[in-house]
Amino acid sequence: NANLHCDSSLVGKKVVITAGATLEKIDPVRYISNFSSGKMGWAMVQAFLQRGADVTLIYGKVSVNIVPFARLTTIHVASAQEMLTVAEHEFSDADILVMTAAVADFRPKNYCPQKIKKVTGNDSYQLELVKNPDILYTLAQSKKAKQVVVGFAAETNNLLANAHTKLSNKGADMIIANDVSQDVFGSDLNEVTIITKDDPDVKLPRMNKQEIAESIVNHIIKLNSK
Ligand code: CTP
Ligand code: CA
């Protein structure tokens, strides 16, 4: 499809993309995180750049190479709280937000500034966790009419029902429902369904993350021009 490449439909638009896993420190040598590779987010970056957008990538722990491109700004963060602070700032003058990041739902209640030691005689250790802010929800609540907010919903079961609930609960304009019951972490392939409030669900065939990203961008452009 020729118009997928070097198309100018998003020239002058600012797109904020979050990618990868957040990292929640326990002590100076340990953390809580997850298996997100950042591949889907990086594919979204490429797809938006191809359409002429100015892209700001806010990324956590990733296993993809983040390399410079014209019209791409990259900002590295660690925790969900840092990601929220940066995302709030970047989204304020943006047109589109795409949250591909796998944000840790909880973080350790207290960061221990010294390495936590085993205690002789203790065979268990309890780490208290507290809820992280919901970045997508927070930004969707404050969004202006023309701003488009897109989330990803990773589910192992009840994919479409859960994704529809997330769309309404979070106030997002679009949720990309992602079946993670099979191997998608770190994989080049993915299988998603695009969910919006007004249009019927669009199930994309299983294909590589770059093709999926290009298709998602086409759907976002349609929403953005409504
Ligand atoms: N998300 C977020 N902030 C969080 C958790 C999730 O912004 N603290 C975003 C993710 O980036 C994703 C969307 O919300 O775009 C859905 O994430 P997901 O983990 O599937 O949903 P949760 O709301 O966290 O619900 P649960 O994990 O319980 O299914
Ligand atoms: Ca979650």
Image: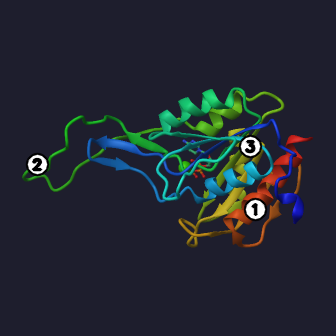
Secondary-structure class at tag 3 = helix
> Do tag 2 and tag 1 residues touch (Cβ < 8 Å)?
no
Going by the numbered disc 1, the residue's amino acid type is Thr
Mark 3 to mark 1 CA distance (whole Å): 16 Å
Place residue 149 in its image quadrant.
Answer: top right
Of the image marks 3 and 1, the number of the one nearer the N terminus: 3
Is residue 174 shown above or below 182? above
For disc 3, the marked residue is 168
Return the residue nearer the eye: 119 or 40: 40
| Number of numbered labels in the structure image | 3
- Disc 2: CA contacts within 10 A as few (<14), some (14-19) or many (>=20): few
Secondary-structure class at tag 2 = loop
- Residue 2 can be seen, yes or no: yes
Residue visible at 8% across and 53% down in the picture: 121
Residue visible at 53% across and 35% down in the picture: 133
- Report the quarter where the C terminus lies: top right
Q: Residue furthest left?
A: 120
For disc 2, the marked residue is 119
For disc 1, the marked residue is 193
- Report the quarter where the N terminus lies: bottom right
Q: Nearer the viewer, mark 3 or mark 1?
A: 1
Color theme of the render: rainbow
Of the image marks 2 and 3, the number of the one nearer the N terminus: 2
Place residue 162 in its image quadrant.
Answer: bottom right
